[in-house]
Amino acid sequence: MKDNNIYMGCHLSSTGGFRAMGETALSIGANTFAFFTRNPRGGKAKDIVPEDAAALCEMLRAEKFGKLVAHAPYTLNPCSAKESVREFAFMAMSDDMIRMESVPGNYYNFHPGSHVGQGVEKGIKQIAELLNRILRPEQTTTVLLETMAGKGSEVGSRFEEIREILDRVELSDKMGVCLDTCHVSDAGYDIAADPDKVLAEFDKVIGLEKLKALHVNDSMNPLGSHKDRHARIGEGTLGCEAIRRIVHHPKLAGLPCILETPNELDGYAKEIKMLK
């Protein structure tokens, strides 16, 4: 059951560990946050200190945080034409599923990838195959497919593509969607002017029960541009008031809202205050 709370945060550095991220979140008025499970450009993840993870979990309970939204590295491409690239995605995401159990019951978001000339159908098949290899019945983490802008050969800019991936995943209860406001606008969904229409289409094609998180970003580019360039809230083509309407939309109540705007911590603090 969704509640009327606004859970707002941003990407935080994991350099200082789990507890440090929680403390940083509180210092900027956040009650959720995102973090990369490893270097956002790929590579080995650092060891997790169990006591540090437990300290964050206690903080999340005490401060009544919303769900956290971890993010896979940008370099992962589950539907690459190269088998070695697909295998790297498998190895990294399999490891991340284990690591996420240090902070159980949260979300793990990833970009579906780019089919690089193989065709959308082949890309969808490969993404679903990867998910069927990494998901386990006992895991507490929900894996989120992110809606994309449609740049190049990206898969996931149309709701129908997301739906088709979900339909091919065997453990469907372990899956959800993260809707990015910049991406959907760049993909051609006019969420700034008519969020009700976009959410109705999402519900018809995918089902709002699958929508688990939001990436809250303004866009540097116009509707349908397929560019994927984030802007600070109020400095792009969506505008502050439109984004505020989305964040406070009754059908989105209780979802973690993650800012990915080009900001430092003080800028995120201002945006969180402005949108809350």
Image (cartoon, helix red, strand yellow):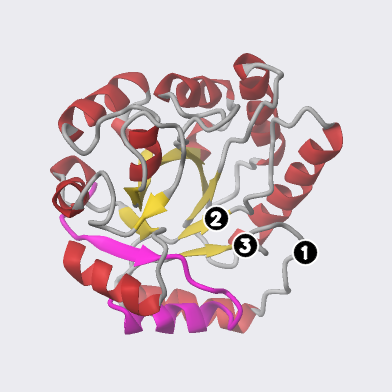
- For this orientation, the residue located farthest to the right is 84
Residue drawn at the location 62% of the way across and 35% of the way down = 113
Contact, mark 2 vs mark 1 (Cβ under 8 Å): no
The location of residue 216, given as percent across then percent down, is 33, 52
Find residue 181 and report its horizontal and vertical position in percent: 33, 43
Q: Could you tell me how far apart the alpha carbons at marks 2 and 1 are, in whole angstroms?
A: 15 Å
Who comes first in sequence, dot 1 or dot 3? 3
Are the residues tagged 2 and 3 within 8 Å (C-beta)?
yes
The CA span between labels 1 and 3 is 10 Å
Per the image, label 1 sits on a secondary structure element best described as loop
* Residue segment shown in magenta: 1-29
Q: Do the residues labelled 1 and 3 touch (CB within 8 Å)?
A: no
Q: Please give left or right for residue 246 compared with residue 135 in the image.
A: left
Q: Which amino acid does label 1 sit on?
A: Lys
Dot 3: element: loop
- The answer to whether residue 28 is left or right of residue 274 is right
Mark 2 sits on what residue?
71
Q: Quadrant of the C terminus?
A: bottom left
For marks 2 and 1, the one nearer the N-term is 1
**What residue is disc 1 on?**
44
Residue 210 position, x and y percent, is 38, 35
Position in image of residue 20 (x %, y %): 50, 84
N-term mark: 2 or 3: 3
Residues 160 and 181: in front is 181
User: Is residue 8 one of those drawn in magenta?
Assistant: yes
